[in-house]
């Protein structure tokens, strides 16, 4: 079967939330064309949605080996690593996403949460503030900033953030 036809099938399966069959076809596609970044990224996302974070990591790493300038791939790789409690590696991935796309609020948010996970609250606060300087109305970032202040015992600042979230 042609790659075009396989990709059409994957698209249909994904629209119907049939992740396991889509994953099987995506593996088939990347076996035939290991340079297919789109399929590698889709495979990583599907594996992540199926809680197969090690597989997701492998797919995102393969895609980034081909093209290291995809901020979303760095974000997703970082998320997969973070879920595996590999926070230092995850933080590096989020920083790479930010290096490529300096206004990537999602990457700042994940980086802040990752830093909070490894008790680097002061740095997390700085990162959350940077995210809010880009997108001041981001409630989830305010909430996580509040948690970072709370972890440092700064309850007044935490309450202010929780109110804004």
Image (cartoon, rainbow, N blue to C red):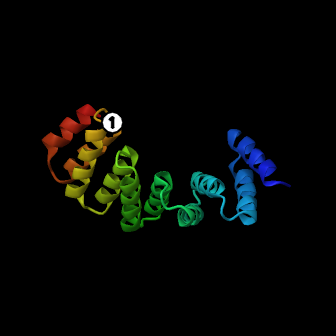
Confirm whether residue 4 shows in the render.
yes
What residue is drawn where x is 40% and y is 67%?
89
Confirm whether residue 143 shows in the render.
no
Which residue in the protein does label 1 denote?
Answer: 138
Measuring from the top left, give residue 107's x and y in whole percent.
Answer: 39, 50
Q: Is residue 103 left or right of residue 16?
A: left
**Where, by quadrant of the figure, is residue 48 drawn?**
bottom right
Residue positioned most to the right: 1
Measuring from the top left, give residue 103's x and y in whole percent.
Answer: 35, 45
For the residue carrying disc 1, how many other residues have a C-alpha within 10 Å: few (<14), some (14-19), or many (20+)? some
Q: Is residue 20 left or right of residue 53?
A: right
Q: What element carries label 1?
A: loop
What residue is drawn where x is 71% and y is 39%?
16
Location of the N terminus (image quadrant): bottom right
What residue is drawn where x is 74% and y is 49%?
7
**Where, by quadrant of the figure, is residue 131 drawn?**
top left
**Where, by quadrant of the figure, is residue 54 drawn?**
bottom right
Name the foreground residue: 3 vs 43.
Answer: 3
Measuring from the top left, give residue 37's x and y in whole percent.
Answer: 62, 57
Measuring from the top left, give residue 102's x and y in whole percent.
Answer: 34, 49
Residue 51, compared with residue 160, is above or below; it is: below
Name the foreground residue: 23 vs 68.
Answer: 68
What residue is drawn where x is 78% and y is 46%?
9
């Amino acid at each position: 079967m042609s790659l075009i036809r396989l990709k059409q099938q994957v698209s249909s399966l994904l629209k119907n939330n049939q992740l396991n069959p889509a994953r099987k076809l995506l593996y088939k596609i990347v076996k035939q064309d290991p340079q297919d970044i789109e399929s590698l990224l889709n495979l990583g996302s599907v594996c992540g949605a199926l809680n197969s974070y090690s597989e997701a990591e492998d797919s995102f790493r393969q895609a980034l080996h081909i093209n290291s300038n995809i901020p979303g791939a760095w974000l997703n790789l970082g998320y997969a690593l973070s879920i595996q409690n590999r926070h230092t590696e995850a933080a590096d991935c989020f920083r790479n996403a930010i290096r490529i796309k300096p206004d990537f609020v999602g990457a700042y948010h994940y980086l802040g949460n990752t830093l909070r996970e490894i008790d680097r609250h002061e740095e997390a606060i700085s990162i959350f503030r940077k995210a809010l300087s880009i997108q001041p109305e981001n409630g989830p970032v305010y909430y996580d900033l509040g948690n970072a202040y709370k972890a440092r015992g700064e309850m007044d600042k935490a309450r202010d953030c929780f109110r804004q979230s």
